[in-house]
Amino acid sequence: MDFTIPDELLELKERTERFVHDEILPRENDPRLTPHGPTEEFRRELAFIQRVDHALRSRITIELHMRLGAAYQRLGSSAEAEANFAALVFFVSRRCGA
């Protein structure tokens, strides 16, 4: 039995890891995410990421709302956390075809 991972999957894994490392993780503790919400510049940047059309788009959107929800929760902004968690559920459901 051959358990070799196909090159296409290895490439996708590497692209995903690189994108999460370069684009998602740095935003988790971004100073532009204030207790009163993201700054206008940060909001525009997040909107751009959500509009990007590539293979990782739905996964990125899910990851973004998950991390923003957690960040807002840590900041004590329960309304923003709840809104991001609700968006997270919506995008996961849509990705799963529910």
Image: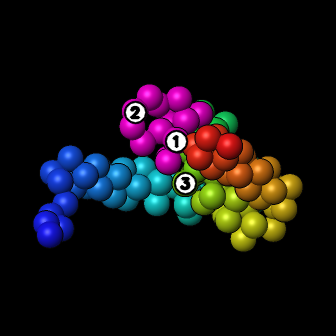
Secondary structure beneath dot 1 equals: helix
Q: Earlier in the sequence, mark 2 or mark 3?
A: 2
Spatial separation of the CA atoms under disc 1 and disc 3: 9 Å
Q: Residues within 10 Å of mark 2 (few under 14, many from 20)?
A: few
Q: Position of residue 41 (x, y in %)?
A: 60, 37
Which residue is located at x 81 percent, y 68 percent? 76
Which label is found at residue 28?
Answer: none
Q: Position of residue 91 (x, y in %)?
A: 64, 44
Q: Position of residue 27 (x, y in %)?
A: 52, 55
Is residue 39 part of the magenta span, yes or no? no
Which of labels 1 and 3 is toward the front? 1
Name the amino acid, label 2.
His
Residue 94 visible here: yes
Which residue is located at x 35 percent, y 52 percent? 16
Which label is found at residue 58?
Answer: 1
Q: Is residue 58 left or right of residue 75?
A: left
In this figure, which residue is indicated by the disc labeled 2? Answer: 54
Is residue 56 part of the magenta span, yes or no? yes
Q: Earlier in the sequence, mark 1 or mark 3?
A: 1
In terms of image quadrants, where is residue 61?
top right
Q: Which residues are magenta?
A: 47-60
- In terms of secondary structure, what is the magenta stretch mainly? helix
In this figure, which residue is indicated by the disc labeled 3? Answer: 63
Which residue is located at x 73 percent, y 55 percent? 85
Name the amino acid, label 3.
Glu
Q: Is residue 97 left or right of residue 16?
A: right
Q: Position of residue 29 (x, y in %)?
A: 56, 63
Spatial separation of the CA atoms under disc 2 and disc 3: 15 Å
Q: Is residue 4 above or below residue 43?
A: below
